[in-house]
Amino acid sequence: MACKACGSEKVAQLEGEITASWSHPEDLKTPPIYFSQQLWVCLDCGFAELRVPPPQLDSLRRKEALPS
């Protein structure tokens, strides 16, 4: 798989533990979402990508759907 940013073939597939949290001050009481997932990192430019698992993606969608 080639890097989508620079085209390098030096892409490593890694296991990662991710914490996703909202950055606005009014969201400080919203708990972060934790998940473990595979991610791909370009060893030349540092570009990384991952796929959020469905249960955590649903949690993000529910938060986004709440009235501001």
Image (cartoon, rainbow, N blue to C red):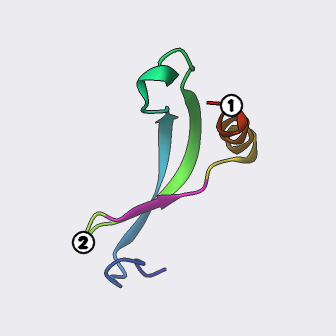
Q: Say which amino acid is labelled 1.
A: Pro
Residue shown at the point (62%, 49%) measured from the top left: 52
Reading the image, the residue beneath label 1 is 67
Q: Where is residue 1? Give x, y as percent.
A: 49, 80
Res. 56 image quadrant: top right
Judge whether 12 appears above or below 57 on screen: below
Magenta stretch: residue 49 in it?
A: yes
Q: Front-most of 44 and 25? A: 25
Residue shown at the point (54%, 26%) measured from the top left: 32
Furthest-top residue in view? Answer: 29
Q: Front-most of 26 and 11? A: 26
Magenta stretch: residue 38 in it?
A: no
Q: Do the residues labelled 1 and 2 touch (CB within 8 Å)?
A: no
Judge whether 2 appears above or below 38 on screen: below
Q: Which mark is residue 42?
A: none
Residue shown at the point (53%, 14%) measured from the top left: 29
Reading the image, the residue beneath label 2 is 44
Dot 1 alpha-carbon crowd within 10 angstroms: few under 14, some 14 to 19, many 20 or more: few
Q: Where is residue 57? Give x, y as percent.
A: 69, 44
Magenta residues, start to end: 47-51
Disc 2, SS? loop
Q: Where is residue 7? Give x, y as percent.
A: 35, 85
Q: Say which amino acid is labelled 2.
A: Asp
Tag in front: 1 or 2: 1
Quadrant, the C terminus: top right
